[in-house]
Structure formats: C-alpha cells, structure tokens
Amino acid sequence: MVPRGSISGLLSSYDPKRLAVATVCSHTSLQIFDGARREGFRTIGICIGQPPRFYDAFPKAKPDMFFSVKSYKEIPARAAELASMNAVVVPHGSFVEYLGVAAFEGLRLPTFGNRRVLKWESDRDKQREWLVGAGLSMPEKIARPEDITKPVLVKFYGAKGGRGFFIAKNYEEFMEVNPTEKHTIQEYVIGTRYYMHFFYSPLVNRGYRLSRGSLELMSMDRRDEANIDEMYKLGAQERLKQFGILPTFVVTGNVPVVLRESLLPKAFWMGERTVERSFELFGGIIGPFSLECIVTDKLEFKVFEISARIVAGTNFFVRSSPYSDLREPEMSVGRRIAREMRLARRLKRLDAVLS
Amino acid sequence: MVPRGSISGLLSSYDPKRLAVATVCSHTSLQIFDGARREGFRTIGICIGQPPRFYDAFPKAKPDMFFSVKSYKEIPARAAELASMNAVVVPHGSFVEYLGVAAFEGLRLPTFGNRRVLKWESDRDKQREWLVGAGLSMPEKIARPEDITKPVLVKFYGAKGGRGFFIAKNYEEFMEVNPTEKHTIQEYVIGTRYYMHFFYSPLVNRGYRLSRGSLELMSMDRRDEANIDEMYKLGAQERLKQFGILPTFVVTGNVPVVLRESLLPKAFWMGERTVERSFELFGGIIGPFSLECIVTDKLEFKVFEISARIVAGTNFFVRSSPYSDLREPEMSVGRRIAREMRLARRLKRLDAVLS
Amino acid sequence: MVPRGSISGLLSSYDPKRLAVATVCSHTSLQIFDGARREGFRTIGICIGQPPRFYDAFPKAKPDMFFSVKSYKEIPARAAELASMNAVVVPHGSFVEYLGVAAFEGLRLPTFGNRRVLKWESDRDKQREWLVGAGLSMPEKIARPEDITKPVLVKFYGAKGGRGFFIAKNYEEFMEVNPTEKHTIQEYVIGTRYYMHFFYSPLVNRGYRLSRGSLELMSMDRRDEANIDEMYKLGAQERLKQFGILPTFVVTGNVPVVLRESLLPKAFWMGERTVERSFELFGGIIGPFSLECIVTDKLEFKVFEISARIVAGTNFFVRSSPYSDLREPEMSVGRRIAREMRLARRLKRLDAVLS
C-alpha cells in the first residue's frame, strides 16, 4: 500500500486548477469522462496501444487525450508521467482487475476513494466480516461441501464478472465440478435482484446525513448474466447437461429497475450501516459503492456482494435516473464523482476524497 | 361511505389557494410529493412516528411537513386536523391497504378520485363484472377446484402485493394448498405482462376524447415478483419442492417496458371502455388507473387486474416516459394528479376530481 | 425494382422545402412523426380507413394529415397522390410486411434508405451470406433435420415477428412439427440478447468514420416474446405439452438494456463491417439498422438477424438513450432519420439517402 502521506505529497505538487480525470478505457469510462467534462475537468483515457475508436461515436464522452500503454501492468511504472499531467485516477472494476489488487494499492497516483477498501472488498471472507458486522443480512455461508443440504451458489474470489460460478443442490452436484480455485459456498437465496448504487460524500453535510457526511441513492439495475438468464428457454436445466450446457453467470449488460418504495428506508439503513462500519474498519468507504441484494418474498434483503466503487450497472443512467433526478437533474455516478472532486477542491479538502 | 355532500361541504371550508397534497409516506409518495410541488402545492407526508429519513436524500420529493400518527388506523380520527391544513388526500395502494377499505371510504377528507371505485376494485368478482361488462377479455374463471383441467393461478382478495398466490396444474396441486381464505381461481394465461398506466381526466376535452373528458397513456412497466421471477435459475420448479421452495408472487419492484405499437389502438380501446363502463356502474373512475394485462402469442390482451389509482410501476417514470413525453415533458403520474387538481381549481370544479 | 433514375426524376419534381415524411400508422410511427416534426418536416400518416384515434393522446406525434387507404396493397396505385404531396416514405417493418417485398421495391415514391437492401434482408440465406461475408459470427446453420444433435431454433422467412418459430433438441422434436413452410434450422445459441440500434450516415464525415460516412450507436433493447419469456413460470416446459402449451416467439414489446462497455469496440466493429460489406454487395445500407445478437458466456457475439431499417426496440427511446445522449440530447432514431433528410436537403444530396 502506498503510504497516505506520499499521495498527499504528490497532490501538493499538482496544479489544482488543472486536475485531469484519468481512467482505463472500459467498464464505465463513457460516463466518467462525460461527467468529468460536465464538471470542468480535463480527461485522460488510458488504453492499450491505439486509442479505441468507439469514443468517436460519443463526442461528449471522448477523453481529451489518450495515454497509451503496452499493457495495463505498465501503468504503475508510468505513474510519474500521469502525475505530471495532474492526473487523478477514477478506478472502476476493470481498472482494478487489469492492474491487480497489489499494483493498484501501490499506485503512486491520487485515486478517487479510499484504496484501503480494496483488501476488504477483494476477499469474500472480509466482505462478509464487514457487512455482517454492519448488521446486514447475507446468504448463509456453507462451511464444507458435505454440509450442502439446499441449493447453493459457489463463487470464486475477485471481480471476474461471475465467470466460473456454479449452482449445486447437493454434495454430488458440487463434486461434479469439484473446484480447486479459492471459492466460497453460499446458500442460493431465491428472490429478485437489485443492485443499488449509493454515493457516500464525506463533504456534503445536508441530505441523508450520517455521523459524518451524507448518503445518496443514485440508481438501480439488474445484471444480465449469460447464460443463466436465458437458458430456461430450452426447457428443464437438468436435461441440458447432455449437451454440455450448464448455468454460467458472466455479466453481459444491465437492465434498469426500481425498488418497491416501502423498502427504501431499509435500503438506506443498509447503506448507512455499511459506511459507518467502514469507518470503524478501515477509515471509511468514499464515493460510489453498490450493495447487490436479493429481495425475498418476505421482503427481506440478502446482500450477496458489495462493490466498493462505480459499477457498470450505472451505465444506463448517464443522463437520468428515477432516483438521482429527485436530487438534481442529469447527475450520473460518473458526474457525481467529478462533482465531489470539484467540491473538495473548492473546500481545499482533496485529501478527504482522494487516496 | 362518507356522503358526497359532506366532502363538498368540507371543501367549501378550504382555502383553495392553500391546498396541500397529503399521502402516506410509502408506495409512490416520492413522485406524488415531487409532482405536487412542481404544480405549486404544499405537501404533507403522513407517517408512523418519526418522519422517515429517506426523503432527506431526495430533496425534490421531501414533503413540506410530516403528519405523524401512531398507526394508520388513527388517520380517520385525526381527519379534522388534516382538514384544517387544507389537505387533499392522494390515495395509493398502501394508503388504502393500511387504512382498510371501509375506513378509507368513510374518511372525512377530500380524496383525489372517486372513492366509489373501491368496492368495485377490492372485490375480484365485481372487478370481473366491471371489466367483462366493459367488453374486455379476462382470464377464464374456474368455478370449482374440481374443474381445473389446465394451469391456474389462485389469487386472494385485496391488494396484498401478490402474497399467497399460487399455481396449480390440476385438482391435486390445488388441494396441496387447499386455501381457506377467500380466493378466486383463474386460468393461467401465458404471454408477456404489460401494466398500462392510464389517466382519465373529466376536465380535459381535447386529446383522446371519451364521451366526457379524455384519456392519456402515461407509461408501462412489468412487475418484479419474488420468487417466481428468478426461481427458474435453480432448475425445474418441480424438483424444488423438496427444499420447500414454491413459486410466490410478492411484488418487489418494477422494470420499464414499451408495448408493440400496433397494439396501442386496442390498449386505448380497453382504457376507454373501462372508463365508460365505470360511469354506468358507479359515477366514473377519475384520474390514474392501471390495466394489468397479459399479451398472448396471438397478440390478444387478457386483463388480469385493474388498479383504480396510481400504481407503483409508475415509479420508474418520475421524469420521463416514452409515452407521456409525447404529450408533455417531465410529466409523471404524481405530477399529472396535481396538474388535474390545479386545473380543477382554476375551473372551480374541484368537486369533479375529488370525493 | 423501381429504377433508381425514376426516383431521382420524381424527386426533381418535388418542392424540397415542403417535403413530408410519410409512413404507415404502426410499428415506430410515433417516433417517426415526432422526430420529423422536430426537424421541421410535415408528416403524413398512412392508415386503413378512419385515422387511428390513439394519436390524439400523443399530440407531439400526431401526423399533420392522414392518407386513408382501403388496404395497404392500395398504396402503390395511389403513389402519385402521395408524390403530389412531396411525400418521402420512411419504411418500417410493418410497412414492408403489409405491402410485400415486391410491391415495396416497386413503389414509385422516394423512400428513406436503399431499397436494394430488401432482397438481402428478406431471404435468410442472403442475410447469412452478407453477415458472414462481413466477418460476423452467426449461429451455426444445420443443413438437414437429421443433423440436429443439439438444441436448434427453426425460423421461417420474412418479418413475421417470430410467429411459428420453434425449438427442437433432436430430430424427433423437429418432426413433431415437421414444417412445410420455407424455414432455416439454426443452432440455438445460449446467452443474453442485445438488439443494437445503429445508424449509418453517408453524409456525416466526423465521429466514428467508415470508408465513407460514419456510424452511430443509438440505443439497445431486448425483445419481449410471448410466450417463451414467461412460460417457465409454470414449471418444466416438457410437462406443459400435455396442455398444448409450446414455446412461441411472438414479439409483444421491448425492454431497454445497456451492454457491458468492454464489448462496445466489438459491437462497433460489427456495425462497421456490416456497412462496408453492404457497399460491396448492393450499394450500401443507408440509415438505421439493427444487429440482433446473443452474447455468450465467453463474451462472444452471435448475430442471429439483421433488420435493415428502424426497429420497434427503439420505441423506448423517443426522448433519451444512454448511447445517443452522449452524442446529442433528445435524439431518437425517428428524429435521426429526419435529421439526415434535412442534412441531405441542405447539401443538395437527397439522392444519397433516398431511393
């Protein structure tokens, strides 16, 4: 982990009037660049080799300049170049995945949010410690495959978009796969899924106030997953094994949703507890995070995952969301991040939102 | 039922310039308050105990004041207090459910819409009498469990968000549940679901005109239901019984949809017939209502339910809808209700939209 | 096919200042009329008999005038009347289906887009020749029913909204239906579906540039299909046959979606190749087209169909789309067509976008 002091030192060498938002050209970069520009920041797209052409089709979201690397692993070694451009990194899931957790933690560039969150997010046991410690309800964890007495989901570590996850209804089905990779066995909770996109601001002291700062709900989506979402169309899952067709959980896109309004108080309570607990554990989660929940037919939430940064499910809401519109029009999560940076700059508190 | 004259009398004691929109803090209250404010009304949030904090996160939708009760049952006894604040009630599904039909009917406060609709909506037999009498097609009703020869849905009375509903494919499956509560057995029609949000205005005499007033289509959604929507992911339903997992139909949220355009003429015809018949039966349905339909693969509509007020499926459309945008921008159903009140006030015809 | 010269001749008799956008009152007509008006064109709604009343509910999308015919087949014979009104036809799926391919090809009216695309689109073998020739990946084609060794989808020719399509998992299941109509047997690829709405402009030479012109991504949807989408709710498909319930694929509406951002470069590549190949084959596809894809759990695209004009999935996006908003606000595909006509008129190149 890069020592906090060194980022503060780096920041003091920056020209605050010329901060540039930098991120990897993928995941949620369109809204990050669009949002940064709307808040008056320059933008830098980090890409492998030639700049991706698809930004040409989205002029409002095309970064002001591209920073080309041979591989994402090269970014840490070239951090000084980015620093010379006053670059502040806005991390997203692909950014972290491409770099690796350790490299991201050690990156000598100011990054939006608290990078201490990473070790709590990337390890499923620590995630559980955090969320359960916050008072949230999670799907039951099954200690050993022998203990499987009801449907379970077997999940691997790290943000891989669901690749390799599988369902088992008993020990035998688990052993058919018998995974060697590090995994966790969770009760498969049945219900409907809501991916709730929150934003915690340590700087704004109005609105939904926490012990410090405030909490906003930006939007919600439901992930599309191949091939679990549509394989039912071929008939009973059990009969598809003969064709080598098994359920898989690879994220391919997102559908916008809204939650039953009577559940919002509980949703906010969950967001609040998650933030408060994060302060106790590691100095706080800053900015966007997502609680990924199943709502059961008893109207109970089961959180199956937390993403501690901007999630791809916000991509539908680049201009408008049923939730953020009730606060301020045209506020995407990408723009909200840039707004927080602008506010921090004005308050001379950039170190409160960058690490 | 409170006599109509008494509400008219009450209204004559109101200061029309200071009308306040009041509703229970749940269901669709965010858009009701946001919409009321946009049309220039004060807003009152009726809540149990302390005001819910989640409104703090939605400043545009936070009511101007809260009216705290110990239980919703207390509202009728405290109606005079609300009346002294010039409160007009905008009812929604939770409001009616929390109060109970009889208490709501007798509530001594002006309420938006015609409260005579309640007894037609809350009784599934009368709903059928209304809709079938209007010429709409509904799923076939099965008189006795012994007559089940194809898949059926067994539904209970009242707006409980689908709780307890179950599917049976034959008499034996029905008898496994053997419900004692008042229920109805309907053919399970297969197709895709569209919840069409209409607005009938008795005051506007342009647009899609009826024998009196006019009809608007505001938006459409599809309800999320736990756990029927996602339980297929575990494989054949039939094999899940051993784990105690049965299909349930509890509404947890909503997904936005649009309908095939060639079906709109029929959709409007259905809305029109529903309104016209309501005048013959009980003096007319006023304001928002929703026809909840299955479209079959023969492109026929089967209406399985009517909601005679604002429905939660409109919550996605607080700012924008593919349908209402073709009439006027930024028109939610919540705002449309307030707009109608404003128009009625200007025309000195508040009694035409309140009861 | 009407000779290109004759349309050019017809156009030279038109008053370019008084062009009117004409289309059949169905499918995507609301956004076509709304968009045309926003770009300053008059609008003509072609209808059978009395004008449909539902436009009254959508004042922004109501055509300036109706052109009533006894049957759509009558349109070609009355083309001169429409021509005298300076009518330019914007074709949509229903327009082409109602007229028939041959009649549409011979229609003596300027139509938006290149009508030579029709014979490539309406024949599934030629579609495959086009798309596979462009380098796109399609579901494998099965030559004979005897070769079915995995799940397949059997599709009929022409744009019938999926009617009659069926799934077979082996030869026996195919023979249970044993279709006599012209059909094609395709591997049933499992994944999640994205209907990507592109717009190719031969006139705009900035943005995502092709060898000539440029490519835009407007929006994406997923089609609702009755009854395949919801029949799983009754339990295993295999057990529903006894009730005569079989999967069907009739389009009833649309749900909005976004695609995983990391797949956009490939999506654009596919759109680009489709356009470039169309120039080699038949002089180019002009204006809107849709690539209808499955994304597999290996994050590969399989294109199962191309629609060579505006598709109904764009109907959700009459005002706003997560993609088009990053180019220009309030740009629907209907409006984009009108914008292209306006640009072509200004450049005196109407013949580049009409045929």
Image (cartoon, coloured by chain):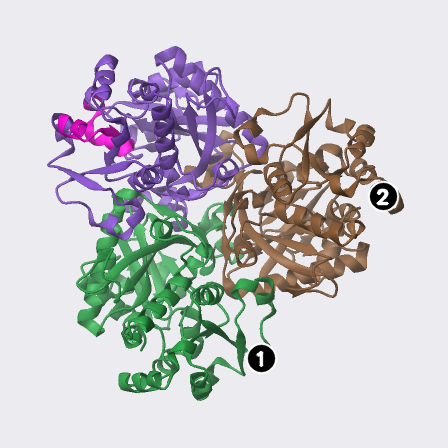
Chain colours: A brown, B green, C purple
Front residue of this view, candidates B271 and B110: B110
In the rendered view, would you say A236 is above or below B67? Answer: above
The residue under the point 53% across, 63% down is: B60
Mark 2 residue type = Ser
User: Which residue has dot 1 on it?
Assistant: B49
Describe residue C246's horizontal placement relative to residue C217 as left or right.
left
Dot 1 alpha-carbon crowd within 10 angstroms: few under 14, some 14 to 19, many 20 or more: few
Does the magenta-highlighted stretch encompass residue B23? no
Q: Quadrant of residue B126?
A: bottom left
Quadrant of the rendered structure where residue C253 is? top left
- The magenta stretch is C80-103
Which chain is mark 1 on? B
B302 sits to left or right of B69 = left
Above or below, B270 relative to C100: below
| B191 lies above or below C11 | below
User: Residue B71: x, y in percent?
Assistant: 51, 82
What residue is disc 2 on? Answer: A12
Above/below status of A106 relative to B344? above
Q: Of helix, strand and loop, which one carries label 1?
A: loop
Q: Is residue B180 left or right of residue B4?
A: right
Residue C208 placed where, x, y %?
52, 24
Which quadrant is home to the N terminus of chain B?
bottom left
**Do we see residue C4 in this rendering?**
yes
Q: Nearer the viewer, mark 1 or mark 2?
A: 2
Foreground of the two, A168 or A97: A97
Return the x and y of residue C156 as percentages of the image width and height.
29, 27
